[in-house]
């Protein structure tokens, strides 16, 4: 599992770097600086994520639960956004991603809350208001992460981050909300 997670992290980093390169290829003067900046920043993030994965696997059982919960909240947020957005339609959320609706965003919060009864049975050592707060923040972060990658794709004038998964885009398209939810979710569980 660890090797799979590291491979997925590396592939998503490559896709992110390619996306940034497409955005910045217009201006050669700023290109070198921004490529170095984004490459360094994304490598630091990737290194931290790999370290976090290894630390979770080696030492800390609670971190495994926090990791699982953060991933599950991000997944449920995506599913809730899709289901509510398709059923209720409604007003568009933003111009960045025209398929995102306000009802979909509300559905993301509702679906992510469905996980609380399953994890509040002793798996997570937090009280109910804390878990509720953390779940809302993780769901919001995953939605913002999805919008951020959509913004980058729009700026790069591409539909998908790569064609690695035909019909689905790249790895980064599949995990765009998760990569932002994991670090914040674990951090919130540790400090609260």
Image (cartoon, grey):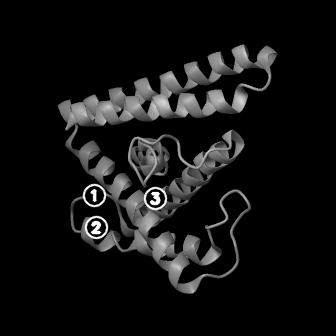
Residue placed at 49% from the left, 34% from the top?
15
What secondary structure is marked by label 1? loop
Residue placed at 74% from the left, 61% from the top?
95
What secondary structure is marked by label 2? loop
Residue 192 seen in this snapshot: no
For disc 1, the marked residue is: 124
Query: Foreground residue, 149 or 158?
Result: 158
Q: Are marks 2 and 1 in contact (CB under 8 Å)?
A: yes
Residue 24 position, x and y percent, is: 71, 27
Determine the CA span between mark 3 and mark 1: 12 Å
Q: Residue 127: which quarter of the image?
A: bottom left
Determine the CA span between mark 2 and mark 3: 12 Å
What secondary structure is marked by label 3? helix
Residue 138 position, x and y percent, is: 48, 56
Q: Is residue 94 above or below residue 189?
A: below
For disc 3, the marked residue is: 134
Ranked by sequence position, the earlier of labels 2 and 3 is: 2
Instruction: Left or right? Give the position of 58 relative to 136.
Output: left
Q: Is residue 174 above or below residue 92?
A: above
Query: Foreground residue, 138 or 5?
Result: 5
Determine the CA span between mark 2 and mark 1: 6 Å
Residue placed at 48% from the left, 51% from the top?
177
Q: Residues within 10 Å of mark 2 (few under 14, many from 20)?
A: some
For disc 2, the marked residue is: 120
Query: Foreground residue, 82 or 113?
Result: 82
Residue 67, labelled with which disc?
A: none
């Amino acid at each position: 599992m660890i090797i799979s997670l590291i491979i997925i992290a590396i592939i998503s980093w490559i896709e992110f770097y390619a996306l940034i390169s497409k955005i910045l290829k217009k201006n050669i003067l700023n290109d070198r600086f921004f490529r170095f900046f984004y490459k360094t920043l994304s490598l630091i993030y990737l290194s931290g994520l790999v370290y976090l994965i290894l630390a979770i696997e080696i030492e800390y059982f609670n971190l495994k639960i926090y990791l699982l919960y953060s991933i599950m909240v991000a997944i449920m947020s995506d599913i809730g956004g899709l289901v509510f957005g398709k059923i209720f339609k409604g007003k568009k959320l933003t111009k960045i991603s025209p398929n995102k609706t306000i009802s979909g965003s509300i559905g993301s919060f509702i679906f992510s809350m469905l996980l609380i009864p399953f994890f509040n049975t002793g798996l997570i050592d937090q009280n109910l208001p804390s878990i509720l707060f953390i779940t809302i923040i993780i769901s919001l972060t995953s939605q913002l992460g999805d919008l951020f990658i959509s913004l980058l794709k729009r700026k790069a004038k591409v539909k998908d981050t790569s064609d690695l998964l035909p019909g689905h885009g790249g790895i980064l398209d599949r995990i765009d909300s998760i990569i932002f939810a994991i670090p914040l979710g674990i951090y919130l569980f540790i400090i609260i």
